[in-house]
Image: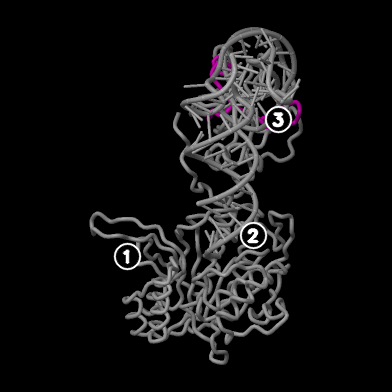
Amino acid sequence: MRAAYPGLEADTSTGDRVAVAGRVIFQRNTGKLCFATLRAGDGSEIQAMLSLASVGEDSLEEYKRLVDIGDHLFVSGEVITSKRGELSVLADEWRMATKSLRPLPVAHKPLSEETRVRQRYVDLIVRPEAREMARVRVEAEASIRRSLIERGYLEIETPVLQTQQGGATARPFVTRSHAFDMELFLRIAPELFLKRALVGGLDRVFEINRNFRNEGADSTHSPEYVALEFYQAYADYRDMARITREIIQEAALAATGSLVVTHADGSVHDLSGEWDEVDLYDSVSRAVGREVTPAMSEDELRGLCAEHGIEPQPHWLAGKCVEELFEELVVPTFTRPTFVLDYPEDTSPLTRHRPDRPGVVEKWDLYVNGYEQATGYSELADPVIQRERLVAQAAQGARGDLEAMPVDEDFLRALEIGMPPAGGVGLGIDRLLMSLTGLGIRETILFPLVKPEARA
RNA sequence: GCGCCUCUAGCUCAACUGGUCAGAGCAAGUGACUCUUAAUCACUAGGUUCAGGGUUCGAGUCCCUGGGGGCGUACCA
């Protein structure tokens, strides 16, 4: 309607009749003339005016008696502008569409963080940023789908309820099937099923869906979060890094219109162009002032951790120590989006090793402003090596690592059928939204998990 | 998981060292007002001060237990 009546002068009568509906978000009543600002579902706002002359005394009295902020109102009448120039509908009829029984919060004071997440329906009404976040999420996800489909990918859906956890190292949520009379896991990753799809000949597949991890929750971790994983046959981790950069850049443009993003800490990040690349072992070597290699023993690396104020956990292997040193000493120095390349083999059991560097696998992590945004791999297709790695993981589990992967015999059988060489990527959608908007993870999720309120 | 902080009206916040401290603004109700846009003015109603226990002549305030939330830290994406 605003588009249909641009630039009308104040105090104009058009003679056109329209019908509008929306939620009353402001009211101003002056005796025989009432104003209400109505907001529609698309966020557009229009002023309704009800005058004694236009609706009559009974209807106006009824209006003043019944209508409160928060009610949904239907108004039909003439398109006019007020004496102050506001585009309005001068009602000749109004009807209550839905009565709001609870008062709305004050629109001009910030809602407490708790009320924002507990009552998102209210947050969405009073806070434009909340509505904007819902829009940005959809547009970013739609852009990613477009980007991948354009590149020949097929979007598939794989099980959330799994009989065996796998595809990542994390503690799962456990649930129970009455029909099967057995324990089930909510998935921690879709990886092993997407790879089964590769075995089956679906050469480029992706999935955007929920993962569940029974671990800590803080400003960058939610127990359920949306992950994108995509796999491409006959690609390697370098190919996947390039595609990842492209789809993130395309998503940033689609969702925010810009490649320059401002994060929660006020830092500004330019996502345009090529991104930095560092080698994991090189960067750690520089940070500690001596050469760190995949050949170093676990004991030696544990000592190195201790030197730098990191307390090694009992189940840490050599590679884990290197990664911890990296996160502690190197990650905070990143100022641009950075791909970190070539990880220790013992922490990446599903990844292909580098033929030229023993103990190193073809994996990268993408860091944006100090947190992991995505991770990519040349996938391990060799069923014999894969079995050895999973058996080693199972041993880790026995050693007390609650996140270690079990041996998935069906997955190994699939690899024995033959998976083409492939690259794969996992990307946290919520984290991407955090990066694009500068908000905490619970603000990017429309209805984040909250503990129940105590009932009075 | 551990540590620190916090919880008062529908919402956002006051109430000094324990002593007329149950308060304000908005929202709501009643009334006034035919051009407001956080309308204005007058009046009214609204509370188990998160819950339970304790100390005290007296507790929103101090102590203990439990719950919700936040921040830090650990694990993790």
Q: Are marks 3 and 1 on the same chain?
A: yes
Q: Amino acid at mark 3?
A: Thr
- In the rendered picture of this protein, how many numbered marks are placed on residues? 3
Q: Is residue A9 left or right of residue A139?
A: right
Q: Which residues are magenta?
A: A62-89
Tell me whether circle 3 and circle 1 mark residues in contact (CB < 8 Å).
Answer: no
Which residue is label 3 attached to? A81
The quarter of the picture where residue A105 lies is: top right
The quarter of the picture where residue A295 lies is: bottom right
> Could you tell me which quadrant the N terminus of chain A lies in?
top right
Mark 3 vs mark 1, CA separation in Å: 64 Å
User: Residue at (66%, 30%) from the top-left corner?
Assistant: A88
Q: Chain of mark 2?
A: A
Which residue is label 2 attached to? A435
The answer to whether residue A75 is magenta is yes
In this picture, is B71 found above or below A104? below
**Label whose residue precedes the other's in the sequence (1 or 2):** 1
The answer to whether residue A281 is magenta is no
User: Residue at (58%, 57%) from the top-left corner?
Assistant: A220
